[in-house]
């Protein structure tokens, strides 16, 4: 029988939201530091969020594969 705490942990949404806010802030700081035009910020944030989504999906696949 699966442990319900391991299959559905309520903190995952908060961690992912924190990661999104962190990535947006880091992108803005890096753009200001390297003096990159502001018009490219949405592109960089979008790419970072897509990368985070793919990483989360990949990690979830690894976790599910390990349990089976």
Image (spheres, rainbow, N blue to C red):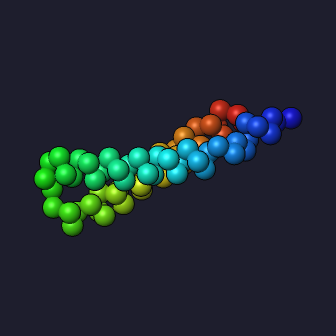
Quick check: 19 above or below 41? above
Q: Is residue 61 visible?
A: no
- In this view of the protein, which residue sits in the foreground, 26 or 47? 26
Quick check: 6 above or below 21? above
Residue at screen point 42% across, 56% down: 50
Residue at screen point 60% across, 50% down: 13
Q: Position of residue 43 (x, y in %)?
A: 29, 62
- In this view of the protein, which residue sits in the foreground, 7 or 24? 24
Among the 4 quarters of the image, the one containing residue 8: top right
How many labels sit on residues? 0
Residue farthest to the right, as pictured: 1
Residue at screen point 53% across, 48% down: 16
**In screen coordinates, is 6 left or right of 20?**
right
Q: Position of residue 48 (x, y in %)?
A: 36, 52
Q: Quadrant of the C terminus?
A: top right
Q: Quadrant of the N terminus?
A: top right
Q: Position of residue 53 (x, y in %)?
A: 48, 52
Q: Position of residue 35 (x, y in %)?
A: 13, 53
């Amino acid at each position: 029988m699966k442990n319900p705490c391991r299959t559905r942990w309520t903190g995952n949404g908060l961690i992912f939201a924190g990661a999104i806010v962190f990535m947006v802030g880091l992108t803005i700081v890096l753009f200001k530091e390297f003096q990159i035009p502001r018009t490219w910020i949405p592109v960089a944030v979008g790419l970072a969020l897509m990368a985070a989504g793919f990483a989360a999906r990949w990690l979830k696949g690894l976790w599910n594969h390990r349990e089976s």
